[in-house]
Image (cartoon, helix red, strand yellow):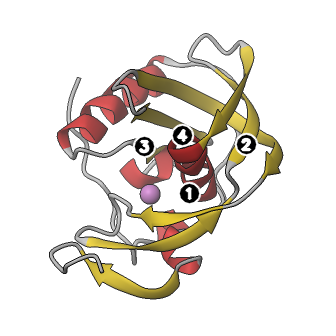
Amino acid sequence: MAIRTIREAGDEILRGSAKPVTEMTPRISAAISDMYETMYDAAGVGLAAPQIGIRKRFFVVDVPDEDGSSHKYTMINPEILETSGEQEGFEGCLSVPGKHGTVIRPMRVRVRAQGEDMQWYEVEAEGLLARAILHENDHLNGILYTDLVKGELLDNDEEEE
Ligand code: NI
């Protein structure tokens, strides 16, 4: 495993539409392992393939819930099936270092995706996990949270409220 360079806003690769993964290859498998390592190293909760320079439709998320238990998913070729409700909260992105902003997202999402074994599975998520899945899915379509932010983009060292 290795830590990959995270592409930052302004890099064209973050703005394109990523291509479907047609088969699991050693290269994609290695990228997935590296994405977890890179995400943990940067203290993030999600990382999408375009962020490490791969124009393919997959991402990883690992979101702890309130009791600290982890919800870790590798999502390949994800499809958002349904969303409901609304949540407003702060969001950041490893490709936009040092910043955060308020983004309104659905509270709940139902998503299907292929795992690393390329088998389809379905997840119903809410709260922070739903936010993370929708944020990472946006990366596959060239969308950054800064496109959706309500009000100002804030510096992380500024007092929040
Ligand atoms: Ni991001």
Q: CA distance from mark 3 to mark 2?
A: 16 Å
The disc placed on residue 139 is: 1
Tell me the mark number nearer the camera, choosing from 4 and 1.
4
On whether ligand 1 comes within 8 Å of the CB at mark 1, the answer is yes
For marks 4 and 3, the one nearer the N-term is 3
Dot 3 corresponds to which residue?
Answer: 46
Q: Earlier in the sequence, mark 4 or mark 1?
A: 4
Kind of residue indicated by mark 1 = His
Q: Quadrant of the N terminus?
A: top left
Q: Earlier in the sequence, mark 3 or mark 2?
A: 3
Residue 160 drawn above or below residue 46: below
| Residue 105: image location, x then y, percent | 64, 61
| Element type where label 1 sits in the image | helix
**Crowd tier of the residue under label 1, counting other residues whose Cα lies within 10 Å: few below 14, some 14–19, many 20 or above:** many
Dividing the picture into quarters, in which one does residue 108 lie? top right
Residue at mark 3: C-beta within 8 A of ligand 1: yes
Disc 4 beta carbon < 8 A from ligand 1? no
Number of the front mark, 3 or 2: 2
On screen, residue 92 above or below 46: below
Q: Residue at x 52, y 38 (%)?
A: 59
Residue 115, label in figure: none
Crowd class of label 4 (few under 14; some 14 to 19; many from 20; radius 10 Å): many
Query: Tag 2's secondary structure?
Result: strand
Is 89 on the left or on the right of 45, as rendered?
Answer: right
- Tag on residue 129? 4
Q: Which quarter of the frame holds ligand 1?
A: bottom left
Looking at the image, which is closer to me, 7 or 148?
A: 148
Give the amino acid at mark 3: Gly
> From this viewpoint, which residue is outermost toward the right?
81
Name which residue type carries label 2.
Val
Q: CA distance from mark 1 to mark 2?
A: 16 Å
Q: Look at the numbered disc 3 and give the secondary structure of its residue.
A: strand
